[in-house]
């Protein structure tokens, strides 16, 4: 390596290697200061020092942006740090950069590290909620997010007075609003990203580079709202009126050749008789339905576990009806105008209006409901029908592998084992709706008939029934 005294004139006169190799020159004044000349003619200062059997190199800057005098001063400073601490300036620089990681960078790293465990829709929700309510924080270092700032912003989101980090009083009307649930959702997203970053960004000795998670203040001061789970469902004594309204809108839509509305009505029926989530119903494909085997399956559910369910009599009739409307190119069971149905609210509003009979002598009010209410209704009726908790968990695809109940780990139910309990729930729904005779009512009628018979008449009736059964065989 050629050595000479660096001056502005000498360095300016240097030409790149015609063969395209990188040239290096050593300063005669400061030992360890190197000048590199690239194939394109770019000239950069760096330091080079052997420490612990390894060469430590660190770039200082480009010439002429960095003057010779400034390069020497900077080189002496870094070489002194290497001599005293033995640390690589590149590592120090990298640690400093990690300690200044922004919320936007940390969010992207969090999403990338979760990989397949984080669904695209969840990643989109994280970006949306953090951007909408803390957009002014996204470019700032995470270390700047203090407990006080989190507390103030959580309160502002609760009151609906902030949007994208700005006071809504200075924005146009209708740009968005907060709420108690939105405030907690924002804080949970921030907590998840910060906790990950707190453990992920560490120096070479394993020490964390960020302060303690600032969202802890919400727990310390008990400021989480703890939004109560929704309990809306279709009441059992309203099931008949609701199902009749769905059928009415289905018939009207069929007469109008509105295939999408018919599809949504069928999807609502399936949601009620299976308890499936909205995305699972509208995403169901014909390739996952085995009509002959009387079962269907869903590969991707909310918790990531595949789900195999039986086809009850009601579902069989529903699938056969859908099959008659199926086109050759259609792969989705409940199709929309452009593939999957995105928003069923318009049809649901028509069904809600149709739940009020005409005339209405009893002054019945509309049955307000949302798509997910069908899932809560299914779970409620299943419990009333006496379906066991383990069976119900499987029917509703609630994860059991992480439970502390060891017994659950040994129970595995497929479509064949779920056929009878699913049929029991189906019958209970139809009984509550008044569409079939209640089994209890039939038993009461039988008891009343037998009460009027003498013992001899009962014996003759039993022998007669047994004889008929044997002849039938």
Image (tube, helix red, strand yellow):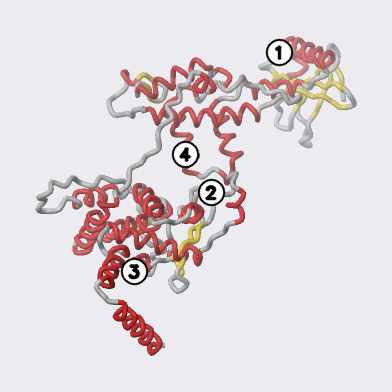
In terms of secondary structure, where does tag 4 sit? helix
Q: Which residue is mark 3?
A: 317
Q: CA distance from mark 4 to mark 1?
A: 47 Å
Res 212 → quadrant? top right
Q: Residues within 10 Å of mark 3 (few under 14, many from 20)?
A: few
In terms of secondary structure, where does tag 2 sit? loop
- Is residue 72 toward the left or the right of residue 447 in the image? right
Which of the numbered marks, if any, corresponds to residue 399? 2
Closer to the observer: label 4 or label 2?
2
Q: Residues within 10 Å of mark 4 (few under 14, many from 20)?
A: few
Q: CA distance from mark 4 to mark 2?
A: 24 Å
Q: CA distance from mark 1 to mark 3?
A: 83 Å
Which of the numbered marks, if any, corresponds to residue 67? 1
In terms of secondary structure, where does tag 3 sit? helix
Q: CA distance from mark 3 to mark 4?
A: 38 Å
Asked if residue 327 shows in the view, the reply is: no
Closer to the observer: label 4 or label 1?
4
Residue 134 on image: x %, y %: 45, 25
Residue beneath the point at 76% across and 10% down: 73
Residue 343 on image: x %, y %: 32, 48
In terms of secondary structure, where does tag 1 sit? loop
Earlier sequence position, callout 1 versus callout 3: 1
Asked if labels 3 and 1 touch by Cβ distance under 8 angstroms, the answer is: no
Res 280 → quadrant? bottom left
Q: Nearer the viewer, residue 398 or 67?
A: 398
Q: Nearer the viewer, residue 53 or 239?
A: 239
Residue beneath the point at 74% across and 9% down: 69
Q: Where, quadrant-wise, is the C terminus in this rendering?
A: bottom left
Residue beneath the point at 50% across and 57% down: 307
Closer to the observer: label 3 or label 4?
3
Earlier sequence position, callout 4 versus callout 1: 1
Earlier sequence position, callout 3 versus callout 4: 4
């Amino acid at each position: 390596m050629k050595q000479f005294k660096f001056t502005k004139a000498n360095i300016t006169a240097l030409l790149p290697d015609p063969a395209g190799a990188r040239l290096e020159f050593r300063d005669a004044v400061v030992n360890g200061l190197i000048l590199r000349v690239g194939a394109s003619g770019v000239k950069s200062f760096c330091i080079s020092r052997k420490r612990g059997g390894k060469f430590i190199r660190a770039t200082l800057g480009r010439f002429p942006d960095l003057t010779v005098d400034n390069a020497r001063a900077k080189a002496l400073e870094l070489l002194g740090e290497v001599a005293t601490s033995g640390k690589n300036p590149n590592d120090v620089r990298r640690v400093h950069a990690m300690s200044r990681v922004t919320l936007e960078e940390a969010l992207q790293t969090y999403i990338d590290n979760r990989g397949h465990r984080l669904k695209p829709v969840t990643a989109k929700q994280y970006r949306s909620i953090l951007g909408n309510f803390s957009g002014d924080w996204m470019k700032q270092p995470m270390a700047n997010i203090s407990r006080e700032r989190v507390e103030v912003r959580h309160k502002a989101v609760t009151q609906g007075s902030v949007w994208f980090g700005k006071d809504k009083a200075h924005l146009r009307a209708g740009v968005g609003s907060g709420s108690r649930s939105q405030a907690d959702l924002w804080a949970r997203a921030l907590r998840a990203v910060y906790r990950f970053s707190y453990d992920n960004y560490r120096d070479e000795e394993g020490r964390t580079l960020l302060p303690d998670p600032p969202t802890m203040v919400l727990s310390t001061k008990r400021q989480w709202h703890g939004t109560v789970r929704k309990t809306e469902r279709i009441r059992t004594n309203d099931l008949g009126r609701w199902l009749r309204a769905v059928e009415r809108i289905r018939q009207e839509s069929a007469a109008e050749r509105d295939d999408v509305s018919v599809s949504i009505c069928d999807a609502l029926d399936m949601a009620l008789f299976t308890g499936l989530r909205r995305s699972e119903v509208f995403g169901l494909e014909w390739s996952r339905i085995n009509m002959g085997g009387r079962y269907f399956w869903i590969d991707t559910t909310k918790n990531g576990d595949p789900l195999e369910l039986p086809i009850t009599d009601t579902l069989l009739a529903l699938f056969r009806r859908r099959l008659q409307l199926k086109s050759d190119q259609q792969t989705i069971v409940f199709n929309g105008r452009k593939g999957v149905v995105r928003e069923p609210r318009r049809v649901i509003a028509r069904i809600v209006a149709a739940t009020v009979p005409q005339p209405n002598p009893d002054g019945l009010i509309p049955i307000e409901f949302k798509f997910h209410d069908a899932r809560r209704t299914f779970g409620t009726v299943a419990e009333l029908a006496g379906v066991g908790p383990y069976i119900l968990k499987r029917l509703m695809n609630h994860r059991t592998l992480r439970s502390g109940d060891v017994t659950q780990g040994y129970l595995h139910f497929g479509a064949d084992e779920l056929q009878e309990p699913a049929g029991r729930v189906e019958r209970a729904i139809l009984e509550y709706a008044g569409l079939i005779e209640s089994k209890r009512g039939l038993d009461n009628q039988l008891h009343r008939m037998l009460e009027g018979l003498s013992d001899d008449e009962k014996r003759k009736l039993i022998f007669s029934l047994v004889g008929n059964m044997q002849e039938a065989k």
